[in-house]
Amino acid sequence: METENALDKSLPDRVTTSRNTLWDSGSFSKGVSLSDQPILSLINLVLQTAYLKPYRPISLLLLGNAGIGKTRLLSPLAKLDFVSYVNDITPKYLVEFLHKVKNGEKRFLVVPDFTNCMSHAMNTRTVLVAILRSMTEEGVIDLSDYHLEFKSSAHVKAGLITATTNASYQQFREIWKGTGFLSRLLPFSFSHSVDTKTRIMKDIDMKKRDCLESVKLSVVKRAPRTVIMPPRLLSQLHVYEELLGKNSGCLPYRHQIQLNALAESLAVLTESSELTQDHIDNVSWLCHWINYDFNEV
């Protein structure tokens, strides 16, 4: 507990600042609310990780109370050709998806409500999580142990982007920590401030058109230039990585890879050949929600 408190005290002040290089550079359509900007920015960075070298897409877990709009925030992903967007998955469907990944057609699996997957019988959901755990980390080679027909000469990896309620997360948290599944998913937890609730309720009364309908997430698919990543800058993210590791039940190295990938993705999307302090500041800003604290937007 003392170590955790020490880490909390060492968090940089800039975590509370309001910055968004992606927004400033015009990566999104205008008119998107301030409360939507952090998660849309993070989603775009996560998508870009699938086009970095070496190929290692990271995965994302949105956490929030029921009705907060998690599915809505993931809806723009359904338009992307390298994403499979499905409401539920079975082991059989995962085999079909992995074949598409193997053939270069898909790079991400998006399940807007992971609660659906966890509502299957225990044996089914155990197999699902086991396959997803391999898919999002070392990659899948052979699923014959699960009586499924999938074999590959090389590890088949893909990212998982999904969401669940706080209640469902609390139900399965210890199991996911124990198997290492939780640490494979970069968390984004959030709640709504009074101002955000007031604005949303006003928009509903006025039948205002949802601004997410015009959002265009984009990635640089061509082989990105090599980005120079100075260790002196990356070291500023270590405090967040250690906190994530403590809360997900693992050492910080996996989260270090994840946050470094976000920083590199931001550099690629802003056409920078070298990581800058501004890139680190933006990732630090996102770390206000890249945790399990359910901070307000």
Image (cartoon, helix red, strand yellow):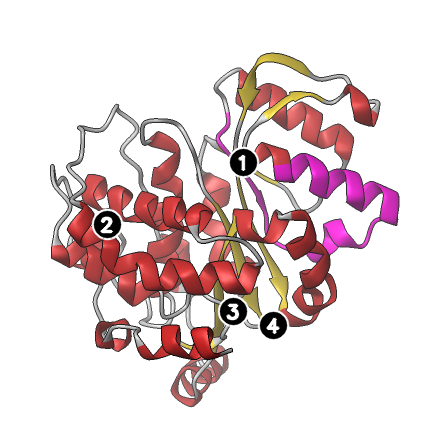
Viewer can see residue 111: yes
Residue for point 78% across, 38% down = 127
- At mark 2, the secondary structure is loop
Disc number placed over residue 27 in the picture, else none: 2
Mark 4 residue crowding within 10 angstroms, few (<14) / some (14–19) / many (20+)? few
> What span is in magenta?
106-133
In this rendered view, identify the residue nearer to me: 40 or 167.
167
- Asked if labels 1 and 3 touch by Cβ distance under 8 angstroms, the answer is no
Q: Return the residue at label 4.
A: 67
User: What's the residue type where badge 2 is placed?
Assistant: Ser
Q: At which x and y percent is residue 175? A: 73, 56
Q: Is residue 246 above or below residue 139?
A: below
Q: Return the residue at label 1.
A: 137
- Asked if labels 3 and 2 touch by Cβ distance under 8 angstroms, the answer is no
Q: Return the residue at label 3.
A: 292
- Asked if labels 4 and 2 touch by Cβ distance under 8 angstroms, the answer is no
Left or right placement of residue 208 versus residue 262 in this view:
right
- Asked if labels 2 and 1 touch by Cβ distance under 8 angstroms, the answer is no
Sequence order check, earlier mark of 1 and 2: 2
User: What's the residue type where badge 1 is placed?
Assistant: Glu
Q: CA distance from mark 2 to mark 3?
A: 27 Å
- At mark 4, the secondary structure is loop
Mark 2 residue crowding within 10 angstroms, few (<14) / some (14–19) / many (20+)? some
Mark 1 residue crowding within 10 angstroms, few (<14) / some (14–19) / many (20+)? many
Please name which of the two marks, 2 or 3, marks the residue nearer to the observer: 3
Q: At which x and y percent is residue 23? A: 22, 58
Q: CA distance from mark 3 to mark 1?
A: 21 Å
Sequence order check, earlier mark of 2 and 3: 2
